[in-house]
Amino acid sequence: MRRVGLTGGIGAGKSTVARMLAERGAVVIDADLIARELVEPGQPALAELVEAFGPQVLRSDGSLNRGLLAHLAFGSPEATQRLNAIMHPRIARESARRIEAVHGVEVVVYDMPLLVETGQQDAVDVVVVVDVPEDEQMRRAVTFRGLGEEDVRRRMQAQAGRSERTGVADYVIDNSGTLEQTREQVDALWRALTTKPAADARRGEACRSDQP
């Protein structure tokens, strides 16, 4: 089984690539989904977040106001560090548990936005980075996620830069073109993951749509 770490900056289109890989037979372990489960009412992580950021991060029904938490947490490096210290170890442990529980498939994808920032690239066999220019990240996050430009800018600053992510990548998916161009690159990636020996699959190049 090939363990693939899939990452990319906000607005890069990582979720689109994850869905395409799932369509081809991969099992996807979604770190964002795990994070949501970890902060459900009654979970220890939620109590720690309230202690760190105040009761205002709770809605009237006791659930987490994720938008307000993000606004507070990305307001300063210190606040971001507090959030990360609470969430990242829990996400990493639960993700590792779920990955280990997967059997009988060729590829399991760990869909993790902060794979590089948390140093988890060594926990996977192959690192795939979904990449677009920063101005396109901004446009997509504002247009499709409804975030404000300043909010997006703070989140981007809290993430690794493009060169830092691509610098550890075994494959880079250029998602700045059409959906069909992205699909062609995912097809090339899938062939490499499922037909090449492990050593050959880890080769550090872009999955251009014109590759054989």
Image: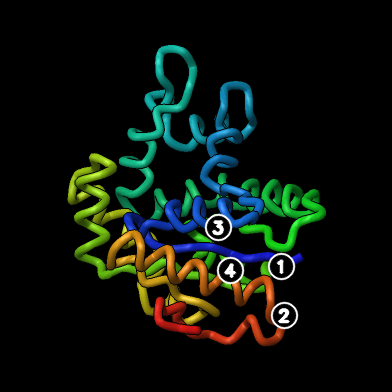
Looking at the rendered image, the disc whose residue lies closer to the viewer, 4 or 2, is 4
Is disc 3 placed on a helix, strand or loop? helix
Tag 3: amino acid: Leu
Tag 2: amino acid: Ala
Q: Are marks 1 and 2 in contact (CB under 8 Å)?
A: yes
Q: Earlier in the sequence, mark 4 or mark 2?
A: 4
Viewer-nearest residue: 44 or 178: 178
Q: Residue furthest top?
A: 61
Residue indicated by mark 3: 21
Q: Earlier in the sequence, mark 1 or mark 3?
A: 1
Question: Residue 196 at what x, y percent from top left?
Answer: 68, 81
Q: How far apart in space, not on screen, are marks 1 and 2 (Cα)? A: 8 Å
- Against 42, residue 74 (above or below) is below
Q: Are marks 3 and 4 in contact (CB under 8 Å)?
A: yes
The quadrant holding residue 9 is bottom left
Q: Residue at x 24, y 56 (%)?
A: 153
Residue indicated by mark 4: 190
Q: Residues within 10 Å of mark 2 (few under 14, many from 20)?
A: some
Tag 4: amino acid: Trp
Q: Earlier in the sequence, mark 2 or mark 3?
A: 3
Q: Residue at x 55, y 79 (%)?
A: 170
Left or right position of 65 against 200: left
Residue indicated by mark 2: 198
- Against 154, residue 135 (above or below) is below
